[in-house]
Image (cartoon, coloured by chain):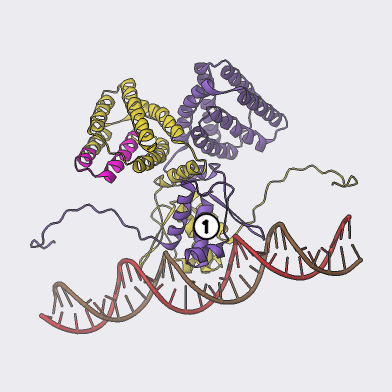
Chain colours: A purple, B yellow, C red, D brown
Amino acid sequence: MGQSNKRPVITVFKPVKSIRTFEAISDQIRRQIETGVLQPGDKLPSDRELAVQFGVSRNSVREALRILESASILELQQGASGGAFILEGDGSNVSRSISDMMALKQISLQHVTEARVELMNVILRLACENADASDFELLEKNINTTRAAVETNDLELQMESTKDFYTIIAQSTKNPMYTLIVAPISEVVRRFVREAGIRIPIEVVKTREQLLQLLRDRDAEGAIAVLSAHLDTIHEAILHRSHH
Amino acid sequence: MGQSNKRPVITVFKPVKSIRTFEAISDQIRRQIETGVLQPGDKLPSDRELAVQFGVSRNSVREALRILESASILELQQGASGGAFILEGDGSNVSRSISDMMALKQISLQHVTEARVELMNVILRLACENADASDFELLEKNINTTRAAVETNDLELQMESTKDFYTIIAQSTKNPMYTLIVAPISEVVRRFVREAGIRIPIEVVKTREQLLQLLRDRDAEGAIAVLSAHLDTIHEAILHRSHH
DNA sequence: TTATATCAATGGTTGAACCATTGATATCAT
DNA sequence: ATGATATCAATGGTTCAACCATTGATATAA
């Protein structure tokens, strides 16, 4: 094996990854967003213009924009007044990333739903402390929407409003971090619900009304108990249907 | 304004997005992974070959591969026996996506650290239930690394091992979802720590040793108390330094 | 005034050429 | 034979130029 006349040198090197052109570009743009130079709604120059500014080919710019687009950071609009627009972050890419990991068998539905229960416990407690009248109003409207969706058997609207329900609760904590985390989890669960073809039974609406009342009463423990039981039911329903 | 002789038509249409070439390609590859046709370790044909198979330009194929690469689904290796290899999902992409969203929403340090405390409480409780000997061993090694980094004043290693510390704790819950959530939060905090130029005082190492002991004792409440106090200290330190 | 046609800007796609990296193979000196 | 070296071929990375498709603005005609 090794030649013994060579002095054994032990060092720690970090792996290098040669910086590719498109990476350098997407990193720069990402950085400008992190530092607030670029903000949601802003429009970048056209790819042709960016190619000139960066001193690279249009192609490299487009690969960089493509990456940012696939990360839901940008939206590319065609046409005369089109271009690359910085998006509001809606977490859709987070949920897709989680789905990707599930496809690669790194995460199971069990993992997702268990974490969901724990996170919702935290969120419910904070929501009980911080929710205000406008939050209650939003929840009330949302529940009415869901009821209508159940009565008209509108499956898509049922799932949409269900996701909104959890988002509103997360928002009522007044800490956007929770919305950021909950939204993609709800989205992932929704995909399973869709695949399993589950319709929301009317009791669920009752449960949500109950939950809203508990929030109004600032009864965190009660709310946690009700929601945990509910989420368990959902989980069981998905597992039951999926195994067919 | 509107012509009153037109019949008002109320319909609900979903927004269409025309399927672009590279999307069709990346979707097909994603689908093959979801269905298990492609599995981690598999190698795709070269981009030139794929271009022929899909009947599109090499460029479109490369944009598709680029998207999958940026989603940590693929790895592109240069050279003679290189190509596109399906990766094991490691969650780095989920974490980066959450990071991206935090940047887009311009979430404040206050919000991040508050959520961090709450989440770590949950994680510590679960870690106390589920951590095993190998987790304790990893933590012990990690703490030793941190101590060495503090003694040699290696700032980068301090931050790196700090991030690892929280990651190991998250992993010891045995639910990868928590690792995914903790990683970007640690990353963001690290960014603030780096900017503030904070060095880890040696007491922090003591705190972590204490925490490890509490985990071994399965003392969740004790661990939560210690870590909450510590995270508060960190938060104060960052705020104090940043305001200069 | 209201359609309609034209135009220009922008993203989407193509094809060809070349560069850079990497492993395999052949060659050569010992 | 052996080991170093040179060459080659395959693959990803980049560039360039041209063209298509979409979209909003503008000019034109009815």
Q: Furthest-left residue in view?
A: A5
Quarter that holds the C terminus of chain B: top left
Is residue B166 part of the magenta span, yes or no? yes
Q: Residue at x 27, y 41 (%)?
A: B158
Q: Tell me which segment is drawn in magenta.
A: B145-169
B25 over A33 or under it: above or below = below
Q: Chain of mark 1?
A: A
What residue does disc 1 label?
Answer: A65
Q: Viewed as shown, does residue B15 lie left or right of A241?
A: right
Instruction: State left or right for residue A18 relative to residue A193.
Output: left
Q: Position of residue B112 (x, y in %)?
A: 44, 34
Position of D25 relative to B215 (above/below): below
Q: Position of residue C16 (x, y in %)?
A: 51, 78
| Residue A227, horizontal then vertical, whole percent | 53, 23
Q: Amino acid at mark 1?
A: Leu
**Residue drawn at the location 57% of the way across and 19% of the way down:** A215
- Of residue B29 and residue B201, the one placed in the foreground of this image is B201
Tag 1, which secondary structure? helix
Residue shown at 13% from the left, 61% from the top: A2
Name above or below for residue B194 compared with residue D16. above
- Which residue is at 51% across, 44% downward? B104
The quadrant holding residue C3 is bottom right
Query: Magenta span has A179?
Result: no
Of all residues shown, which one is farthest toward the front? B244
